[in-house]
Image (tube, rainbow, N blue to C red):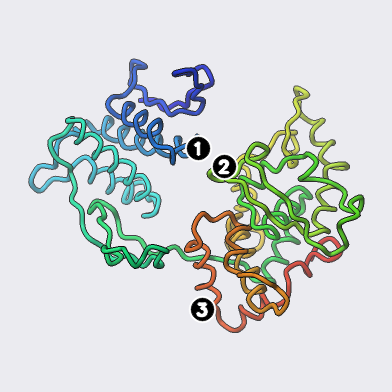
């Protein structure tokens, strides 16, 4: 089997489907019925609109069917008495042999479960190789909770593994300082600062555009004063944003100065290093003059973790920003608004229940951790760095 993503030449009904996942057999033909399922899922479901989501769905199916084919299993047949089904064997192999996290395995299994449900409706199988169990959720009640007769219970496929609720990991102020000082590369330090002080996701940081509206000299703006925060509107047409959902962030004045200086003095040098003279729209470029990939950023933080002696990831910077900001706004006597909603909008959460996780974290913090976040992190960056 092979897994490839279509280029712009895949055109159906006048639309180019660049990034559409293709599952091919040894002869280069579509792997059916998995390929038809992907087509039905993506083209008929408006919520699956991002090519990144397409890739996640496609890869989950490819990983399952590659396992099935290589082990000579029949995905259509339920498990024999005392023997696991193909789906159970895949789950156990992912956990025991590959060593994937339960969360990762369950994310893939949910895609495969949807495939099996589709296959049953299409008549490809006689019955599902799993059952459903009723479980109690801990999700916060929503606006229509008064008309919800489920009592917070949902039906979950029995094939899924048990997993703990995700824990939010943040950096203390002392850890932030250690990390910043352990980054010798100017570009890496600036990316670190941007994610920490605005809550950007790593993909948003990597694709931050080098254009007016995102990078400029704030001293030329008469409507801006020193030590102010600059409201910026993020547009998915300019950069990669999760779910292509526009949002606004508040960028510190001094950080905008650093971005502008970097663009003028340092980025141009890196851009000239591209061996083919190609230019890119992103602000941050590697030493070879190309935009950073996700793999490159993961490697940067892996190397940083080794240098500082504790685990640190790009997403921990987003968690740290959200936790500190929510704590700061809640204790502020001048902020007029709802802190939880403000943080939700800055992070781009579609549901405030996601943001509530940070509120639970704050309420459970030990005294010394609370004190570590009482002073603004911005003070660490006064004068260009901690």
Comes first in the chain, label 1 or label 2? 1
Looking at the image, residue 332 sits to the left or right of residue 222; the answer is: left
Question: Marks 1/3: CA distance?
Answer: 36 Å
The answer to which of 10 and 87 lies nearer the viewer is 10
Q: Is residue 76 above or below residue 183?
A: above
Q: Are marks 1 and 3 in contact (CB under 8 Å)?
A: no
**Residue 278 placement, left or right of 121:** right
| 325 relative to 251, above or below | below
How dense is the environment of label 2, judged by Cα within 10 Å: few (below 14), some, or many (20 and up)? some
Split into 4 quadrants, where in the image is the N terminus? top left
Q: Is residue 305 visible in this depiction of the protein? A: no
Q: Nearer the viewer, mark 2 or mark 3?
A: 2
Separation of marks 1 and 2 at Cα, in angstroms: 8 Å
Front-lying residue, 383 or 216: 216
Report the disc number at residue 364. Answer: 3
Q: Helix or strand or loop: what does disc 3 sit on? A: helix
The residue at the point 61 percent across, 45 percent down is 203
- Residue 244 is labelled as 2
Q: Identify which residue is drawn at 44% across, 62% down.
A: 166
Q: Which residue is mark 1?
A: 50
Say what secondary structure mark 2 lies in.
helix
Local SS, label 1? loop
Q: What residue sits 39% from the left and 65% below the top? A: 139
């Amino acid at each position: 089997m092979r897994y490839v993503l279509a280029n712009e030449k895949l055109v159906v009904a006048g639309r180019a489907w660049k990034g559409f996942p293709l599952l091919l057999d040894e002869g280069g033909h579509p792997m059916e019925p998995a390929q038809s399922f992907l087509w039905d899922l993506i083209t008929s479901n408006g919520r699956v609109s991002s090519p990144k989501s397409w890739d996640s769905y496609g890869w989950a199916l490819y990983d399952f069917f590659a396992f099935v084919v290589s082990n000579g299993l029949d995905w259509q047949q339920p498990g024999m008495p005392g023997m696991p089904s193909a789906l159970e064997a895949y789950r156990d192999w992912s956990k025991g042999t590959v060593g994937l996290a339960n969360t990762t395995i369950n994310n893939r299994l949910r895609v495969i479960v949807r495939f099996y449900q589709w296959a049953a409706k299409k008549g490809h199988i006689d019955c599902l190789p799993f059952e459903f169990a009723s479980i109690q959720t801990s999700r916060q009640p929503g606006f229509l909770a008064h008309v919800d007769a489920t009592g917070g219970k949902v039906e979950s496929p029995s094939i899924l593994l048990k997993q703990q609720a995700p824990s939010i990991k943040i950096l203390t102020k002392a850890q932030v300082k250690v990390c910043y000082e352990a980054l010798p590369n100017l570009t890496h330090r600036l990316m670190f600062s941007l994610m920490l002080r605005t809550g950007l996701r790593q993909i948003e940081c990597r694709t931050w555009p080098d254009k007016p509206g995102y990078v400029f000299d704030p001293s030329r703006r008469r409507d801006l004063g020193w030590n102010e925060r600059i409201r910026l509107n993020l547009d998915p047409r300019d950069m990669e944003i999760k779910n292509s959902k526009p949002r606004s962030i508040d960028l510190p004045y001094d950080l905008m100065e650093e971005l502008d200086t970097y663009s003028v003095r340092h980025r141009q040098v890196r851009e000239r290093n591209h061996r083919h003279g190609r230019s890119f729209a992103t602000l941050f470029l590697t030493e070879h003059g190309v935009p950073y990939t996700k793999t490159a950023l993961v490697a940067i933080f892996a190397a940083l973790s080794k240098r500082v002696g504790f685990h640190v990831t790009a997403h921990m910077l987003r968690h740290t920003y959200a936790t500190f900001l929510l704590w700061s706004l809640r204790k502020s006597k001048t902020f007029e608004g709802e802190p939880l909603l403000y943080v939700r909008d800055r992070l781009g959460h579609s549901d405030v229940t996601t943001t509530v996780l940070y509120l639970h974290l704050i309420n459970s913090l030990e005294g010394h951790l609370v004190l570590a976040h009482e002073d603004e992190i911005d003070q660490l960056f006064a004068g260009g760095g901690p």
